[in-house]
Image (tube, coloured by chain):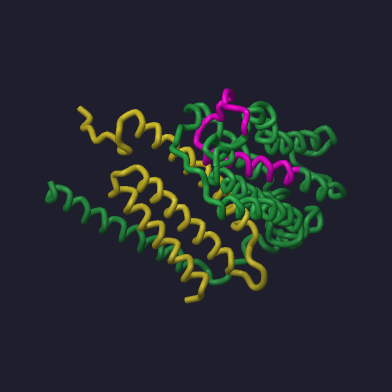
Chain colours: A green, B yellow
Amino acid sequence: MSNQQKIPRIFLVILLSVMGAGLAYTVLSLPAEAPGLSERVTDNIDVSGVENPVTAVVLNFRGYDTLLEMAVLLLALLVVWSLGPVPQRHEVAPGEVLDYLTRLLVPLLILVAGYLLWVGAIAPGGAFQAGSVLAAAGLLLVLSGWRFSARFTGLSLRFPIVGGLAVFVLAGLAMMLDGGRFLEYPVAYAGTLILIIEVAATLSIGLILVELFLGGRPSQCQSPGARIASKTEK
Amino acid sequence: MTTAFFYALSGIALFILGLYALVIRVHLLRKILAVNVMGSGVFLLLIALATRTQSTPDPVPQAMVITGIVVAVSATALALVLMLRLLGAGGKAELPDEKIE
């Protein structure tokens, strides 16, 4: 058995070495200086509505990519939900320190997410960064025993989850009604539109990532308490 | 060799290492991790090559990597949930190694 496996493994190493060498050669033969599209972005930054070039590309010049990416996130969540309910796991109540720290950290993380969202217009930041910080806050809550109350797992959870994509598509379609093309923002409103889309996207991304982590459809028949039972006994 | 190329070559090394693990490892969790290492290599390569400018780095590859990270995270989550379903159904997180007749 081991002999049988050894021969292909050596072949694999040789094959991957050749592949790696080829890739390395290709990269090294690239010109040492290539401005790419950075000059075009810098030249057109005034019409994007934001000052940070990365945000301008993500939400204006290549807005279509970002739109489809929100769709991918939503699709992944739909598949995860369709596979079954949240699996039952053995849960232990968190200690006093973790509990206190969570209560301290979560508001701070929400504040940081808001800051990242706002600062995305002029400096590194934006919807995805803010969304991941929001998701981190959500994961901290989940890991220390907090759960969505059954009251909030219906439409009040689904609306913000779909909201990111919906607002994006609606904003794009509104531009068409206005005489422009899909996702072609008029210069005067571009900044405002991008901020609105980003707020919805941040909420969506945060919630979707937490729901993906939970790994299943939220059950509707949970006891109405927001926290797990072992928590309240303590 | 500039730092951009050093990081780009590191990205290629990560990609190749990930590909090796993807083929060799049997456990699906390791395969999922391997795909993630490969993805990180690609992101590193893209970001490294974006810095080959005079002043500010090219924002287009950076935007692509932001998009890519989110897609990679959602794909990983989906793969992990599928792996857990397979574990629940078959008792082990491995793909069946059956010969096609």
Hey, which residue is sitting farthest front in the picture? A234
SS assignment for the magenta stretch, majority: helix
Residue at x 57% of width, y 23% of height: A221
> Residue A68 location in percent, x, y?
62, 39
Q: Residue extending furthest top?
A: A221
| Residue B39 forms part of the magenta stretch | no
Identify which residue, A62 or A199, lies in the foreground: A199
Would residue A72 be visible to someone looking at this image? no
Residue A151 in the image, given as x and y percentages of width and height: 66, 28
Count numbered badges in the picture. Answer: 0
A125 or A100, nearer to the observer: A100
Residue at the image position 45 percent from the left and 58 percent from the top: B41
Quadrant location of the C terminus of chain A? top right
Image spot of residue B67 (x, y percent) = 59, 49
Q: Is residue A25 left or right of residue A195?
A: left
Residue at image x 78%, y 48%?
A: A195
Left or right: residue B75 versus residue A192 is left
Looking at the image, residue A150 lies above or below residue A144: above
Q: Which residues are magenta?
A: A197-225
Q: Position of residue B19 (x, y in %)?
A: 36, 52
